[in-house]
Amino acid sequence: MQVTVETVSELSRKMTVRVPGEKIREQIASRLKSLARDVRVDGFRPGKAPRKLVEQRFGGQVREEVVGDAISSSLQEAFQQEKLRPAGMPRITPTSLGEESDLEYVADFEVYPEVKLNPLEQLQIHRPASEIAESDLQAMVERLREQRRTWRVVERPAARGDQVNLRFEGTMGGESFTGGMVENFSVTLGAGQLIAGFEDQLTGNATGATLNFSLPFPEDYFNEELRGKTGDFSVEMIDVRESVLPDVDADFARSFGVENGDVATFLADVRENMEREMQRAIQSQLKNATLDALYAANPLTLPDSVVDEEVEHLLTPHREDAKRHNRPLGDESVLRTYLRDAASRRVALGMLLGEIIREGGLDADKTRVREVVESIAQSYEKPEEVVRWYYSQPERLRDVEHRVLEDEAVEWVLQKAQVTDEPVPFARLMQPAQAGANADAEHVHDEHCGHEH
């Protein structure tokens, strides 16, 4: 086998592979001979059909199979011989199929870049530092009270925060777009559940009020038929209800699992849960800050094929969400462009973490893997069965092992980097938007460098 490799660009390669034609012809002859012993041909007993007839009938198919197998095996051998790490599937172009001469083909592909980490000691990482103030505890208790709120009918005009029970119909050009009258529809004023202006029309009106008004639908409304158009609404207010929050007493404490109803115990439990969530948030944001610093300090030229594959991966939940809500996905080209930066970041971080894992000689700690599996299992009705399911087949543990390995890589970086504490108020630390701002950085190792470890 002869192999020549041409460097087309930094990551693009053109490899020409030549396989001796004699080898191809020998394999074809061998397969036809074996086939002639077993094949059934009309007019002949099994294995008695003339070889020429077998070759005429099956020769093309056998040649195609032999050439395909030869390309596949020689391609892998060529990669190993030339010490190449292809990124994505090569594009194969046969230039000679070995009928009278050698088999020759050209493989166009990209390779992974060589990853050389800049000194980790130069990384500057800010670790959030926070504590739970009494005001944070009280704010949490208020949220828990809101979870246990009840609603009481009142005989007064509706105000912000009230719940209004309605029957209504929406029409456009005399045609109903709500499928007739909608009965017993509840809306909390100020929650922004309905299109802009709808809740304003209800505010200040009492039980029994009948309202007629028109409102425009947003240009980005999920129902394409209503986007940017004006709907006419007929509304009857069935009742108005105000929120009633429970007192923080023994019954309230018992409703959250404090059997003896002791309020002090309840507050201590709440604070303990807040502490756990705070530590999770700190670890999550510290991890994201570490990945941010690692990504910024180590720019890489990335294979387009791998980034394209990651874009497809990121598109999947958008497609599933659109299908679940029975609405169009929209212009995929626009969404692909939007997702490309996130995809590039994930691919680059996967490669960087892979290099860190190799350099640090890291391996997924079995004890930590077990702890993660048991933590996942706790959210199920029968956790012990979930644990058994994970451990019944090694491939099921792979995702958990990758997560643990990624965390170990981040910890290894933190041991070398310059880490300084940055005070952050508890409320800001726990904001969902903040916690999820770099969600694309989570679990990047499994897809892009796990196979190289």
Image (tube, rainbow, N blue to C red):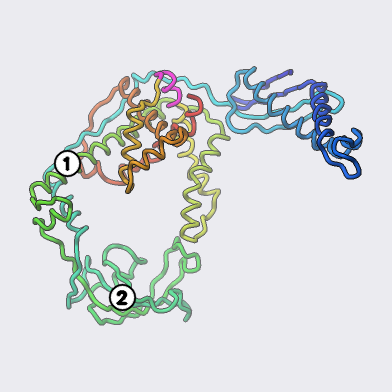
Crowding at mark 1 (Cα within 10 Å: few <14, some 14-19, many 20+): few
* Dot 2 alpha-carbon crowd within 10 angstroms: few under 14, some 14 to 19, many 20 or more: many
Q: Which residue is mark 2?
A: 166
Which mark sits nearer the N-terminus, 1 or 2? 2
Element under label 1? Answer: helix
Please count the marks in the image. 2
Give x and y (percent) for residue 29: 84, 27
Name the spot of residue 349 as percent of width and height, x first. Answer: 44, 30
Give the residues in magenta. 353-361
Residue drawn where x is 81% and y is 34% of the image: 35
Image coordinates for residue 192, horizontal then vertical, percent: 31, 63
Q: Which mark is residue 272?
A: 1
- If the image is split into quadrants, where does the N terminus sit? top right
Q: Are marks 1 and 2 in contact (CB under 8 Å)?
A: no
Is 381 or 175 nearer to us in this picture? 381
Residue type, label 2: Leu
Q: Residue at x 44, y 33 (%)?
A: 398
* Residue 63 vertical placement versus 228 (above, below): above
Q: Which quarter of the figure has residue 126?
A: top left
Amino acid at dot 1: Glu
Taking the spot 52% from the left edge, 45% from the top edge, the residue there is 336
22 sits to left or right of 282: right
Q: Quadrant of residue 105?
A: top right
Give the prevailing secondary structure in the magenta stretch. helix
Would residue 444 be visible to someone looking at this image? no
Residue 66 in the image: above or below residue 251: above
Is 354 inside the magenta-drawn segment?
Answer: yes
What percent of the width, then of the height, locates residue 217?
Answer: 42, 67
From the viewer's perspective, tell me whether residue 45 is left or right of residue 382: right
